[in-house]
Amino acid sequence: MVDTAFATRQAMPVLLQSVGQVQPEHSVQIRPQVSGVLKRVLFTEGQTVHAGQPLFQIDPAPYSAALASAKSAWESAKANADRMAPLAAKDYVTPQEYQDAQSAADQAEAAYKQAQINLAYTDIRAPITGRTGSLAVKSGNVVGPSDTTPLVVINQMKPILVQYTIPQQQLSGVRHYQAAHGVSVFITREDGSGDLGTGKLVFIDNSVNPDTGTVMLKAEIPNRDVQLWPGQFVGVNTQLTLQANAVVVPSTAIQPGQE
């Protein structure tokens, strides 16, 4: 039995098919800037957090005490320098004595400002909006800037990037259509099924990989439904253009061969 079908004319996209890998547009390793006991963890693993949201609190007591001491030292040094200013003007003290007093006041002020910064560092907040990974350290442990493992990693999920490669022979065409009207990118599952999102080409690497003869590209996908996950392998269809009046036949009617 032989089935027949008519060839038709319709708009058809010109696609480049690839396999890509999902990457977060921003990934931040959260590390402490000061040492101390991790007093509180203010989120749960895997939670979506927002920029500026409190994440951790390091015991602030030692830094509050250091700040009070630094403030007292600065006020004392400043008062001494202010007291010596009119005396220096009347030559009751030497210029060097006044300069030393003023220098001591400046150093004490710098120490006071650093103490303020150190105290602020005990409150660790999210620098970006994204999804948190697993916690490396629980509350009650001592943490510090020299720790090799971050407290947690935050990956931005919306939007998200898909990195993939194309053969170098396709580079000129991609660049042409990108400059003309931009290039749309459609993401599927790795086997080509499903619709995981639509985005746009945002990056073309500045060199060809000499080992593979390919060029690396990146597409940005809104990922509103968070169907794409960092590290995931996906199918990538790069639409260069749309042929408005293409001749179309069923794919089963095409018999590929050496000719």
Image (spheres, rainbow, N blue to C red):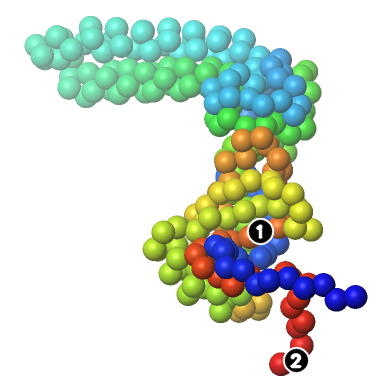
Q: Is residue 156 visible?
A: no
Residue 104, image quadrant: top left
Q: Farthest residue toward the left?
A: 90
Q: Secondary structure at mark 2?
A: loop
Residue 64, x across and y down, in percent: 55, 10
Amino acid type shown at disc 2: Gln
Category of crowding for the residue at label 1, using alpha-carbon neighbours closer than 10 angstroms: few (below 14), some (14–19), many (at least 20): many
Q: Which dot, 1 or 2, sits closer to the camera?
A: 2
Q: Is residue 196 visible?
A: yes
Name the residue: 71% across, 57% down. 235
Point out residue 249 in the picture as x, y percentages from the top left corner: 68, 71
Q: Residue at left 57%, top 41%?
A: 222
Tell me where residue 78 sits by quadrant.
top left
Q: Answer above or below: position of 152 versus 11.
A: above
The residue sitting at the bottom extreme is: 259
- In the picture, measured across the screen, residue 168 lies left or right of residue 236, that is left
The dot on residue 46 is: none
Quarter of the image where one finds residue 82: top left
> What is the number of the mark on residue 258?
2
Q: Is residue 104 shown left or right of residue 175?
A: left
Taking depth in this image into account, of 189 and 194 the one nearest to the observer is: 194
Q: Which residue is mark 1?
A: 236
Q: Is residue 71 left or right of residue 222?
A: left
Please determine whether, in this image, residue 48 is positioned above or below residue 176.
above
Q: Nearer the viewer, residue 115 or 75?
A: 115
